[in-house]
Image: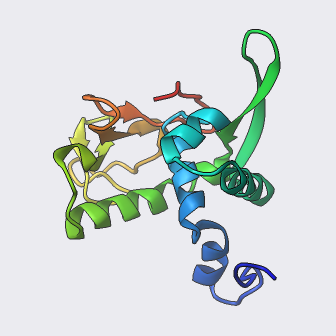
Amino acid sequence: MPLRSDWSQRTCSIARGLDILGDPWSVLVLREVFFGNGRFDAMKSRLEVADSVLTKRLAGLVESGLLEKKAYDDGGRTRQEYVLTPMGEDALPVLNAVTIWAEKHLPAPSEQAHLYVIHSSCGNPTTSADTCTECGERLTGANTSWHSRSRSEQPIPLSTASRRGTPA
């Protein structure tokens, strides 16, 4: 029996979108790939997730067209890493919106537990998911950074479909 219903054919756009982006593990996998952390072992370590859960979410995101596999050589054998597709990159405002909402309404357990959306072009944090509240420019993967003190003292430029970041 499936864990949940298939909403892919619903007449409501929100329901169809949630069919892909409504699973917390899938959104957290996308977060890792935006951070440039697309290798299975690195994601597993950062997410503290079981192999079976991560494998299923990665397969679903590939099947849905948000991620694709890219071969890399680890110094002895060819392995696969996951990278964003343009469709996956278009999910950025959704992740930004969740981040901004959580920062506004939910307490962080520590100072290290904050995540801020930064418009890299002007260097300012934003409180909008798709437009910089300081300069008005549209936010994209190429001009957005996330600042997570648990990862780095400096904002981390996001990986995009056209620019591959380095693992953070």
Q: Is residue 62 left or right of residue 25?
A: right
Left-right relation of 43 to 153: right
- Residue sitting at x 70%, y 47%: 67
Q: Residue furthest front?
A: 50
Give percent across and percent down for residue 137: 34, 48
- Asked if residue 110 can be seen in this view, the reply is yes
Viewport quadrant of the C terminus: top left
Q: Quadrant of the N terminus?
A: bottom right
Image point (77%, 53%), residue name: 59
The x and y percentages for residue 51 are 69, 48
8 sits left or right of 145 in the view: right
Colouring: rainbow
Above or below, 24 against 149 in this view is: below
Residue at x-position 40% and y-position 57%: 96
Residue nearer the viewer, 150 or 51: 51
User: Going by the picture, which residue comes out furthest to the bottom?
Assistant: 11
Rendered position, 19 above or below 142: below
Residue 2 picture location, percent across and down = 78, 79
Q: Residue at x 79, y 10 (%)?
A: 76
Q: Is residue 39 visible?
A: no
Looking at this view, is 147 or 78 the one in front? 78
